[in-house]
Image (cartoon, grey):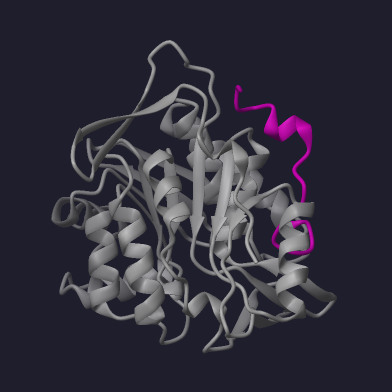
């Protein structure tokens, strides 16, 4: 069961055949206002929250938030042949998302989520599910060649099948595509090899403070300060931008040309923090696609993330006063 949007071939986008099996898409320069195409790549699942079941998964959340800022967005994943698969498709459609989610003989993914007194989630992630078995399809390849931004993490790469599909899709994107690696380390579902491969593929890395210490130790950097460690990662892996979030304290954006932005985390009444990081990534990406300066993109991402923390579930609708801050 899957849905392929008829709008996948974006206006103003055409393909030139340079030689057999080599396709180079490009955009016509006179079509500056065309919608950008973003892809959330990896797990689509159900968060089993205390208040009920809600659609989630970092890539789907990312796609949902980029769509709210006027971009075309596609969630690429896989579902099962079960009732939850039908519910997943219906939920994606209710959220206005396009999707490529081929069926598999594995159950649709679920995650049990428990919240502490501060709304911070703990996840129990079931294994052997549909998004562990994402097949590579022609439709996925077509979307990859046309997209302006793609976001993925480590979790869906825990299985060989999905990892190969994800890495192939990333390799098919254009050189000017924003390749966002939202590392999202969960439990033991990652290896140095998976992280290293994705670091080599991305142009933007999003990482939190706990993950920062894991990664810097993993690659033998010792215990560097945030700026020094991020600079080392950017140099070693040719990354343009690193977003480093530090929970309730604040967040940094470092750029390869020496740029630095720091913003304290706003104080809000937290309902839960599920999806807050994904909203940050989706907003920051949308702002960059709209050519906003890094500092403005950072400010808006922080504000959106804070708003999402005041709502229940990973996919709240953003108020117009927020979405209007990115020109369309």
Give the percent coordinates (x, y) of residue 328.
61, 23
Residue occupying image coordinates x 69% and y 61%? 314
Q: Could you tell me which residue is drawn at 62 percent across and 82 percent down?
A: 122
Say which quadrant the N terminus sits in: bottom right
Residue located 77% across and 79% down the image: 83
Image coords of residue 111 (percent x, y):
64, 81
- Write the residue at 72% across / 67% down: 88
Relative to 33, is 225 on the left or the right? Answer: left
Quarter assignment of residue 278: bottom right
Q: Residue furthest right?
A: 51
Q: Position of residue 159 (x, y in %)?
A: 39, 82
Q: Is residue 277 visible?
A: no
Decide whether residue 327 is among the magenta residues.
yes
Does 57 appear in magenta? Answer: no
Mark yes or no: residue 224 visible: yes
Q: Position of residue 186 (x, y in %)?
A: 47, 79
Number of numbered discs overlaid on the protein picture: 0
| Magenta residue span | 310-328
Between 182 and 105, the residue placed more toward the observer is 105
Q: On the rendered structure, is 294 left or right of 129?
A: left
Of residue 151 and residue 81, the one placed in the foreground of this image is 81
Question: Quick one: 13 or 43, which is closer to the camera?
Answer: 13
């Amino acid at each position: 069961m899957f849905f392929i949007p008829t709008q996948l071939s974006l206006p103003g986008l055409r393909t030139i055949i340079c030689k057999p099996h080599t396709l180079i898409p490009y955009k016509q320069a006179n079509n500056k206002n065309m919608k950008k195409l973003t892809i959330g790549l990896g797990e689509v699942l159900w968060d089993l929250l205390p208040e009920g079941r809600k659609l989630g998964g970092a890539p789907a959340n990312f796609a949902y938030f980029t769509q709210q800022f006027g971009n075309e967005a596609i969630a690429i994943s896989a579902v099962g042949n079960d009732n939850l698969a039908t519910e997943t498709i219906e939920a994606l459609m209710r959220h206005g998302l396009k999707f490529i989610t081929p069926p598999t003989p594995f159950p649709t993914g679920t995650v049990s989520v428990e919240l502490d007194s501060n709304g911070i989630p703990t996840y129990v992630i079931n294994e052997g599910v549909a998004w562990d078995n994402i097949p590579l399809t022609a439709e996925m390849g077509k979307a990859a060649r046309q997209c302006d931004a793609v976001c993925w993490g480590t979790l869906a790469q825990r299985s060989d099948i999905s990892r190969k599909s994800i890495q192939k899709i990333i390799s098919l994107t254009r050189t000017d595509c924003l390749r966002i690696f939202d590392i999202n380390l969960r439990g033991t579902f990652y290896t140095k090899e998976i992280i290293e491969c994705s670091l080599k593929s991305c142009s933007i890395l999003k990482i939190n403070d706990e993950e920062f210490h894991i990664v810097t130790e993993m690659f033998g950097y010792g215990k560097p300060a945030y700026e020094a460690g991020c600079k080392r990662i950017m140099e070693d892996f040719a990354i343009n931008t690193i977003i480093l979030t530090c929970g309730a304290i604040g967040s940094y954006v470092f750029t390869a040309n020496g740029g630095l932005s720091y913003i304290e985390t706003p104080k809000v009444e937290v309902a839960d923090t599920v999806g807050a990081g994904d909203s940050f990534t989706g907003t920051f990406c949308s702002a960059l696609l709209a050519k906003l300066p890094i500092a403005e993109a950072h400010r808006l991402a922080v504000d959106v993330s804070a708003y999402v923390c005041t709502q229940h579930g990973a996919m709240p609708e953003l108020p117009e006063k927020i979405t209007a801050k990115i020109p369309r």
